[in-house]
Image (cartoon, grey):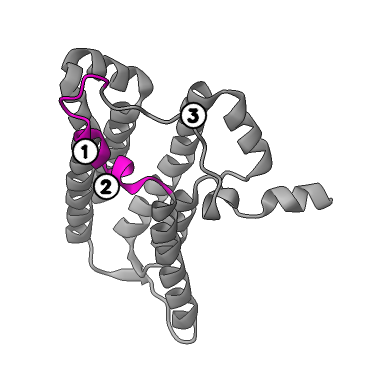
Amino acid sequence: MKYLIVVFLWVGFGVIHSILIDLRVSNWANRVLGRYFTFYRLGYNLLSLVLFSAMLYITKTLDSELILKFVPPWTIVQQVLLIGSGVVIIWAFLSYDVLEFVGIRQLMSFGKKKGFYYPKTITKKGLLGIVRHPIYFATIVFIWSLNSTRVDIVAHLVLTIYILLGIRLEESKLVKEFGLAYTQYQMEVPALIPFTKKLQRTK
């Protein structure tokens, strides 16, 4: 029963997260909220953080028996993966406009007649020139490098599936936003696993 609870909770989190970031929903919110739409991105991030923290807390309270535990010398590999994926997440985060990503830059435009301008450019610097979704890649590596209970593993499976589905939804949205420019980016840079495009070209 507790496994079904975990699946239900994490799927619910994923559905809410996806709906709120969907272009149709955000465009509707823009029409309804008017100039107050500048608070949308920050509100979305805060809600996501609260929900994620709640899901994580509930998951941890349902089971405490570890069934996936790294032991020496594999703990060295575990630490390398955890630290490496953490560095990648931070590095990737800094590759974006952090203020815009969080929602602060939008707030800075509140009350201005022109409102907030979303730049129609694709960043290909740093990690984003190696893999299109470095945060997703690092997140998958990170969660599967943790010592885990049965409930954790169920949650990790749901999150991994959600990330893979989320990439497809996000890619569809980005193609609509950027058109051929993003299609070209897709051809040049792999979505999730670094350097696979180069391997394909060398075959």
Closer to us: 194 or 78: 194
- Mark 2 or mark 1: whose residue is earlier in sequence: 2
Circle 3/circle 1 CB separation < 8 Å = no
Q: Amino acid at mark 3?
A: Leu
Q: Which residue is mark 1?
A: 42
Q: Report crowding for label 2: few under 14, some 14 to 19, many 20 or more residues within 10 A (C-alpha).
A: many
User: Does 163 sit above or below residue 111?
Assistant: below
Closer to us: 81 or 148: 81
Q: Select label 3 or label 2 by which is in front.
A: 3
**What's the magenta region?**
96-114
Q: Which residue is mark 3?
A: 174
**Which residue sits at x=47%, y=60%?**
141
Q: CA distance from mark 2 to mark 1?
A: 27 Å
Count of numbered marks:
3
Residue 144 visible somewhere in the drawing: no
Q: Is residue 30 left or right of residue 128?
A: left
Q: Image quarter for residue 188? A: top right
Where disc 3 sits, the SS reads helix
Q: Image quarter for residue 152? A: bottom left
Q: Report crowding for label 1: few under 14, some 14 to 19, many 20 or more residues within 10 A (C-alpha).
A: many
Q: Report crowding for label 3: few under 14, some 14 to 19, many 20 or more residues within 10 A (C-alpha).
A: some
Picture coordinates of residue 179, whole percent (x, y)? 56, 23
Q: Amino acid at mark 2?
A: Val
**Which residue sits at x=31%, y=27%?**
19
Q: Which residue is mark 2?
A: 6
- Mark 3 or mark 1: whose residue is earlier in sequence: 1
Where disc 1 sits, the SS reads helix
**Which residue sits at x=27%, y=44%?**
102
Q: Amino acid at mark 1?
A: Leu
Circle 2/circle 1 CB separation < 8 Å = no
Picture coordinates of residue 36, whole percent (x, y)? 16, 23
